[in-house]
Amino acid sequence: MEVQGQQMTETKTAPGLFKRNPPIAGEAEAIERAKAGDAEAFSKLYALHKRRVYTLCLRMLGNVSEAEDMTQEAFLHLFRKIGSFRGESAFSTWLHRLTVNLVLMHLRKKGLQLVSLEETINPSEEDSPKRDFGSRDTQLAGSVDRVALERAVASLPPGYRMVFVLHDVEGFEHNEIAVMLECSTGNSKSQLHKARLKLRELLRQSESNQLADVKEAAL
Amino acid sequence: MTLLKPSSNSLSCAEFQEQLPDMFASGGTGYIDDPDLLEHLKTCDNCSALVRDLQYIADQAKQLLQPTHEPSDSVWKKIQEGLASDSSYAVEPNEK
């Protein structure tokens, strides 16, 4: 299968991704059975990976309905092409790469040109992180909870969110992201930096809102 | 915070922050070994806070790798239908 010019075959994975995707009990056996067309093995693989694939789709797309459609597509592709999995990389890494490529292809079909991040999905001026060297910054309290971070990531502009999820959450390297998004490595680095700056802004905003709520409740 | 360059060796905040994307590019750890950058970091509270926050955000992002969302049951049903219509595989309609 070829998804947007990229072969859905295995590639050697960065060592970090093996650490992030350790083998799962029963997975290897299920893969072998699924290769032979065992329906129960498909079910097992779906149960093992549905949450991570769906969460990845949801984070990249920001939309439940589209995320479910892409989860379905990803598993259908997986089950049809599982025979080409040779076990040279972690199965979940292979599945995630397949999912990312399908989501990117979906976004391209929708008209979101990912060819040049700077020119097309670069956020508008008001969405960009502010660079005010004259004002004094306050530091984050250092206790940002997962829900606040999830919310902040979801509200990032699409271009920032995509690179942040691929690099900081999923662990892809900038050169891999550059290939996937058809942009330069420098572009990927720059988008990631802007994404983190924007997240900092959003998280600080969220902290000060929480503080204001506490003060109001105390009155 | 350094708005102007006091000497030829010291960096302004803008110059320091221009280096941040590359500084954080490898693994998100923000390891700094350039003496000029280190010097600025020592003397600028604002940029120190920024670097600490960016490191913190990169660290916290890893916790998002654990999935929290679950697709609805209809997704698996549609996958089963898709596979059933594919002649290569025979999937029991109600199997999960």
Image: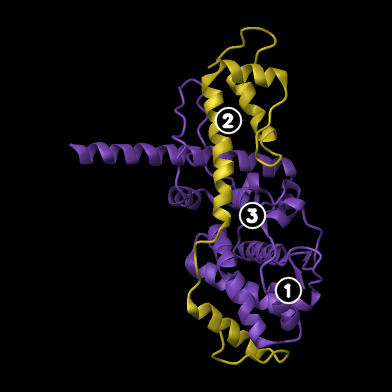
Q: Quick check: do tags 2 and 1 share a chain?
A: no
User: Please, is residue B66 above or below residue B89 in the view?
Assistant: above
Which of the chains is yellow? B
Within the image, what quadrant is residue B13 found in?
top right
As measured in the structure, the alpha-carbon distance from the residue carrying label 2 to the one carrying label 1 is 42 Å
* Residue at the image point whose x is 55% and y is 18% from the top: B44
Mark nearest the camera among 3 and 1 is 1
Q: Three-letter amino acid code at disc 3?
A: Glu
Lower sequence index among marks 3 and 1: 1
Residue A125 visible? The answer is no
Q: Say which element carries label 2.
A: helix
Q: Extreme top residue here?
A: B7
Say the numbered circle drawn on residue A3. none
Horizontal arrangement in the rendering, residue A31 relative to residue A195 (left or right): right
> Where residue B40 sits in the image (x, y, percent)?
62, 18
Which of the chains is purple? A
Q: Chain of mark 2?
A: B
> Where residue A49 sits in the image (x, y, percent)?
61, 70
Q: Which residue is mark 1?
A: A28
Horizontal arrangement in the rendering, residue A105 relative to residue B61 (left or right): right
* Residue at the image point whose x is 47% and y is 37% from the top: A142
* Residue at the image point whose x is 66% and y is 67% from the top: A24
Mark nearest the camera among 2 and 1 is 1
Which of the pair A44/A102 is nearer the observer?
A44
Q: Which residue is mark 2?
A: B51
Say the numbered circle drawn on residue A170. 3
As measured in the structure, the alpha-carbon distance from the residue carrying label 3 to the one carrying label 2 is 22 Å
User: Please, is residue A125 above or below residue B5 in the view?
Assistant: below
User: Please, is residue B31 above or below residue A7 in the view?
Assistant: above
Which of the pair A44/B11 is nearer the observer?
A44
Q: Three-letter amino acid code at disc 2?
A: Val
